[in-house]
Image (cartoon, rainbow, N blue to C red):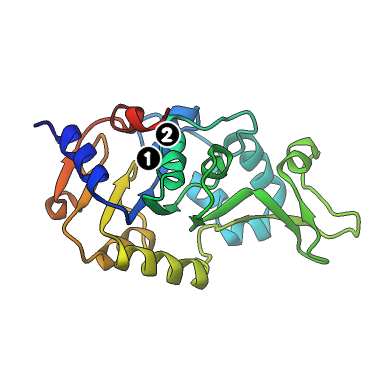
Amino acid sequence: MSNIDEFVKWIDECDNIVFFGGAGVSTESGIPDFRSPDGLYNQKYKYPPETIISHSFYQRNPEEFYRFYKDKMLYPDARPGVTHKALANLEKQGKLKAVITQNIDGLHQMAGSNNVIELHGSVLRNYCEKCHKFYDLNYIVASEGIPYCECGGRIKPDVVLYEEGLDENNISEAIRYIKNAQMLIVGGTSLGVYPAAGLIDYYRGDKLVLINKSATPYDGQADLLINEPLANVFERFSK
């Protein structure tokens, strides 16, 4: 039996599944990841991407921040891929209890997933720093330079920048789902970003599945390891 056949068998047997995903989930939707050879971290800019999307840089140089952010982090035309659709279907069947994502693109919800914990926020939500009025993605895309609210305040995306902490409620919820999961599927993440990667240490079961094209620091802990593109693994659940 292949690893993918084993994976399908486990899904058939389980009714309390949690999915923890990273950038690899959205690459099939045309959104590049950060750490692959052609990812954002390996492209050349005036400043390193990690610097530009940090809290202090945003405060110090919002114009340069927004130039990079709009150019490289917003994909308004992206649509859900095979994995997003498969996870939404598994939730509808009552098998998948939560999606915990490091992505900020909102594609899980677009695919139909309802219980999504966004560890790093979402580009779809933007707020005035002064009056807290909400603005959608289209407003940011259409704005020139730094987006401003009608009250004159600067608008900030609801995404977790470098140097900013994760939302405590999201962390608590993620831990609760992972602790209670019968099966934990970790997909499309190098598991190199903390504190998010450390969340899988809370899993107590015996069905930890790691699906990633390259090796991760947690490979030795996996009960099932699949080094394949996510779409190849999830395609039979996406219809």
* Observer-nearest of 166 and 19: 19
Q: Quadrant of the N terminus?
A: top left
Residue linked to disc 1: 35
Residue linked to disc 2: 39
**Left of 39 or right of it: where is 52?**
right
The amino acid marked with disc number 2 is Gly
Rendered image: mark on residue 48? none
Residue 33 showing in the rendered view: no
Question: Where on the picture, by quarter, is residue 60?
Answer: bottom right
Verify CB contact (< 8 Å) between mark 1 and mark 2. yes
Q: CA distance from mark 1 to mark 2?
A: 5 Å
- Residue at 67% of width from left, 40% of height from top? 67
* Observer-nearest of 104 and 100: 100
**Left of 140 or right of it: where is 237?**
left
Tell me residue 23's x, y (percent). 42, 41
Question: Where on the picture, by quarter, is residue 214?
Answer: top left
Tell me residue 42's x, y (percent). 41, 35
- Residue at 30% of width from left, 51% of height from top? 191
The amino acid marked with disc number 1 is Arg
